[in-house]
Amino acid sequence: MHRGWFHWRKGMICRLKPAKPKGPLVRDLKIPEQRHPEKAHRPDNAQPKKPSWIRVKAPGGAKYAETHKIMRDNGLVTVCEEAGCPNVGECWSQGHATMMIMGGICTRGCTFCNIATGRPEGLDMIEPGRVAAAVEKLGLNHVVITSVDRDDLADGGAEHFAQTIRAVRHRSPNTTIEILTPDFLKCPDSALEEVVEARPDVFNHNLETVPGLYPEVRPGARYFHSLRLLQRVKELDPSMFTKSGIMVGLGEDQQTVRQVMDDMRAADIDFLTIGQYLQPTPKHHAVDRFVTPEEFKAYEKAAFGKGFLMVSATPLTRSSYHAGDDFAQLREARQIKLRQQ
């Protein structure tokens, strides 16, 4: 008789209920309903066929495999994988990867984003050292470090960012560091100050879209708070490069995109990125249209005309795409501007 299912009691054979599993159930983040529970009730949006200028080669090759191994050996999460970036094959094949700290689960539920949503686990205190080790092994000249939103933390993860910056500086003093941060919306002013005091070379925070689309696309954020965050970075350290980006193809028009450019320049942002929004799943925000390369070129010309030191505006542009090469051009552009003054 199988002891797990039957029990002898008072002359009767009784079937026992299976024991309930102890502890929290483990989510399978490959299942859309578990990865994005907040989107499960949403109606499906059709995913239009991508035009020729969007298509990329599938990832592969020896260098790609080596980068993948270094990430796994150091137990690191990358936004390249979690956000489903179309450039992962190109970047990893060149030994470039964007580190995503503080776990792979975000406390926000933006309708465009493919990063898992839910309640994150506690911070890993040795993660900054693991990031620094991976940067050293990859031999990076420039590294981009980003994170999920951590509204569960009093400082939004600011101290963890600062510790990671310092750890990379210690092991790779010649590596330039670019951070892509959350908005620290619910945090005291000291949170941003702590990150700036760690002195990253580039402080990036994305506005993501035009203000009129925030309620639908980025409901947990506030457009003018994000803009003010970047302005405060410049006030705290005028020498620090600031950077921000938006996606197009979400339902905005050209006039509102150009207004965002003006808002960014009023906040003294140095570097603008504009890329095509790509819909991760049918439950995510629909693609309104695919913006042509010619329109991206027009955005680039307009942005340079408004005074940005550096602009990257192409269908496949992402915040960290070609970040090292772009940083070199950004630094050179500042030197040219200073000489002209």
Image (tube, rainbow, N blue to C red):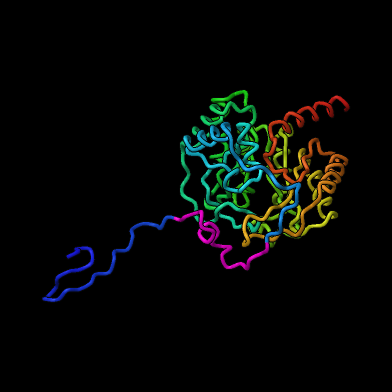
Which corner quadrant of the image does residue 214 belong to?
bottom right
- Placement of the N terminus among the 4 image quadrants: bottom left
**Residue nearer the viewer, 254 or 68:** 68
Vertical position of residue 252 compared to residue 79: above or below = below
Provide residue 105's location: percent of width, then percent of height. Answer: 53, 51
In the rendered image, is residue 224 in sight?
A: no
Q: Is residue 41 a member of the stretch shown in magenta?
A: yes
In the rendered image, is residue 287 in sight?
A: yes
Q: Which residues are magenta?
A: 27-46
Q: Is residue 291 a member of the stretch shown in magenta?
A: no
Which residue sits at x=77%, y=57%?
A: 289
**Residue nearer the viewer, 98 or 123:** 98
Provide residue 34's location: percent of width, then percent of height. Answer: 50, 59
Which corner quadrant of the image does residue 231 belong to?
top right
Vertical position of residue 136 compared to residue 65: above or below = above
Provide residue 196's location: percent of width, then percent of height. Answer: 64, 36
- Total numbered circles: 0
Provide residue 131's location: percent of width, then percent of height. Answer: 53, 34
Which residue sits at x=69%, y=42%?
A: 319
Is 33 placed left or right of 325 in the picture? left
Vertical position of residue 52 compared to residue 174: above or below = below
Which residue sits at x=86%, y=42%?
A: 301
Q: Provide the major secondary structure of the magenta segment.
A: loop
- Placement of the C terminus among the 4 image quadrants: top right
